[in-house]
Image (cartoon, grey):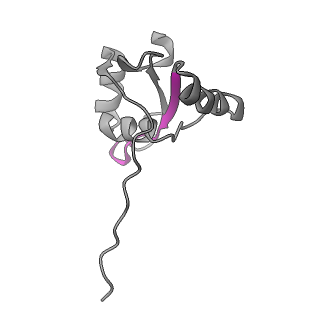
């Protein structure tokens, strides 16, 4: 047998500050069986999710300039739901001063 694979955790690129999420995002993540800390881990390590190249570049510049950082993730429906749910999108926004990071639905912006 081989040795267990080890993964090196990516270091955070910025501070998240206070963590918040909206009731809508909380409901979607619960229904889609998504742990918010998994999404936050992607966000803070520079995996911006489902963004166009221009928005991803804006985030990369924000790391240098100290402006707002934005990620978008498409959540697949849980297997237990079959075809009854469509994929859902959640956004994560870290404010420019890195005091607050919020998970929300696009329609809650």
Asked whether the viewer can see residue 46, the reply is yes
Is 74 a magenta residue?
Answer: yes
Residue 22 left/right relative to 71 = left
Q: Quadrant of residue 62?
A: top right
Q: Residue at x 39, y 46 (%)?
A: 11
Of 54 and 107, the residue lying toward us: 54
Q: Is residue 90 above or below residue 43?
A: above
Q: Is residue 10 magenta?
A: no
* Residue drawn 52% across the image and 30% down it: 72
Q: Nearer the viewer, residue 95 or 33?
A: 95
90 versus 32 height, above or below: above
Magenta span covers which residues?
Answer: 69-81
Q: Position of residue 43 (x, y in %)?
A: 45, 35
Determine the image quadrant of residue 21. top left
- Judge from the rendering whether residue 99 lies leftward or rightward of residue 50; answer left or right: left
Residue 76's place in the image compared with 88, above or below, is: below
* Residue ranking furthest to the bottom: 1
**In front of the other: 50 or 7:** 7
In this image, 42 relative to 66: left or right? left
**In the rendered image of this protein, does residue 82 appear above or below residue 72?**
below
Query: Which one is nearer the viewer's eye here, 91 or 101?
Result: 101
Question: Residue at coordinates 70% horizontally, 35% vertically from top-left?
Answer: 53
At horizontal 35% and vertical 17% (from top left) the residue drawn is: 100
Q: Position of residue 64 (x, y in %)?
A: 57, 29
Residue 69: x %, y % from top left: 51, 24
In this rendering, the count of numbered labels is 0
Q: Report if residue 33 is visible in the image.
A: no
Question: Residue 78's x, y, as percent?
Answer: 37, 43
* Quadrant in which the N terminus appears: bottom left
């Amino acid at each position: 047998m081989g040795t267990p694979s080890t993964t090196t955790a990516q270091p955070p690129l910025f501070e998240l500050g206070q963590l918040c999420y909206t009731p809508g995002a909380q409901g979607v993540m619960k229904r889609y069986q998504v742990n918010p800390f998994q999404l936050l881990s992607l966000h803070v390590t520079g995996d911006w999710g489902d963004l166009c190249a221009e928005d991803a570049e804006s985030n990369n510049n924000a790391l240098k300039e100290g402006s707002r950082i934005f990620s978008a993730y498409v959540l697949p429906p849980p297997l237990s739901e079959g075809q009854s749910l469509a994929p859902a999108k959640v956004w994560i926004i870290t404010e420019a001063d890195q005091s607050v990071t919020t998970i929300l639905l696009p329609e809650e912006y």
